[in-house]
Amino acid sequence: MTIDGYLVELQRLLPRLAGRRAVAEVREHLRDTAAEQRAAGLSALDAEVAATQAFGSVENVARRLGAELAVRESRLACVLALVAAAFFVFPLYVVPENTLPPATWVEKPTDIVLLQAVAIGCWIGACLLAALATLFAWTRWSRLAAPFLLGSAVAVTGSTAVSAALVARWFVVTAATPNWALAAPLAATCVGVCAGAAVWARSSSRRLVTS
C-alpha cells in the first residue's frame, strides 16, 4: 500500500479532528522510512510499500493511536471541567456578594440558610468530582473519569438551580432587583463546559473500551 493510501485508510478509522495530528505524525514517519528504503536501492513505489508494511496494519495502528487520542482527550476534558467547576465560585458567591443588597433581617431565614448550604454543598461536590476525574485520567483507569465528570456536571447544574432559587428568594425579602444579566451567563458557561466535558470524556472512554 502506498503512503497516501495508508493515510487515507488511517484517517477514516480515527476521529476526524483529533486524528489529524496523529496522521500528520504518521505521514512524517512513513516518509522518513521510505526515504531510507530508497537510499537502500528500492524504487519509490517499493519504498512506500515497504514503509507501510513495516509500520503495521492500518487497523492495529488505528486502535493504538485511537486509544492514545482517547486518553489525551479525557485528560483535557477533565482539566476543562475542573477549571469550570472552580470558576463557578463567581456566579455562586462573588457576583451575589457584590450585588445583593444588605439584609433586612436580624436572623437569617431558615429557608435561605438551607438553600445556601445546598448550593455550596453541590458546588464543593462538583469540584471534588472533577478533581477525582482528573486524578483518574492520569492513571491506567482513565476510562473511569467520565462518570465522575458526569457527576460534576450534574452537581454544577444543581448548584445553579438552587442558587437561582436562593437569589430569587433573597430579592423577594429585600425587595430589590437581582443582577441576572451578569450571574446567569457565567453560570450557564460553567454548566455548559462541565456538561460538554462529560460528553467528550464519555465518547473517549467508549473508544478506549473498543480499542
Image: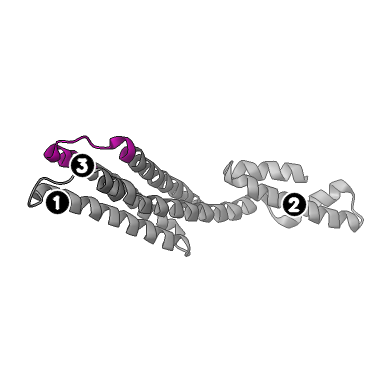
> Image height check: is 138 above or below 49?
below
Q: How crowded is mark 1: few (under 14 residues within 10 Å), some or many (20 or more)?
A: few
Note whether 169 is above or below 75 in the view shown: above
Q: Position of residue 191 (x, y in %)?
A: 35, 43
**Residue lying at 73% horizontally and 49% vertically, measured from the top left:** 27
The stretch drawn in magenta includes residue 174:
yes
Q: Callout 1, which amino acid? A: Leu
> Callout 3, which amino acid?
Val
The residue sitting at 23% across, 41% down in the picture is 164
Q: Which residue lies furthest to the left in this view?
A: 106
Distance between the alpha carbons at the discs numbered 1 and 3 = 13 Å
Magenta stretch in the rendered image = 164-184
Q: Is residue 177 magenta?
A: yes
CA gap between label 1 and label 2 equals 60 Å
Q: Between disc 2 and disc 3, whose residue precedes?
A: 2
Residue 96 falls in image quadrant: top left
Indicate the position of residue 104 as horizontal and vertical percent values.
11, 45
- The residue under the point 31% across, 38% down is 184
Q: How crowded is mark 2: few (under 14 residues within 10 Å), some or many (20 or more)?
A: few
- Quarter of the image holding residue 64? bottom right
Disc 3 is placed on an element classified as helix
Residue annotated with mark 1:
114
Residue 27 left/right relative to 77? right
Residue 50 x/y as whole percent? 80, 53
Q: Can residue 180 be seen in this view?
A: yes
Q: Residue beneath label 2, please?
A: 28
Residue at point 81%, 49% (across, down) = 48
Q: Which of marks 1 and 3 is in front?
A: 3
How crowded pointer 3 is (Cα within 10 Å; few <14, some 14-19, many 20+) is rated as: many
Residue 136: % across, % down: 42, 62
Q: Name the residue under label 3.
A: 167
**Among numbered discs 1 and 3, the one appearing first in the sequence:** 1
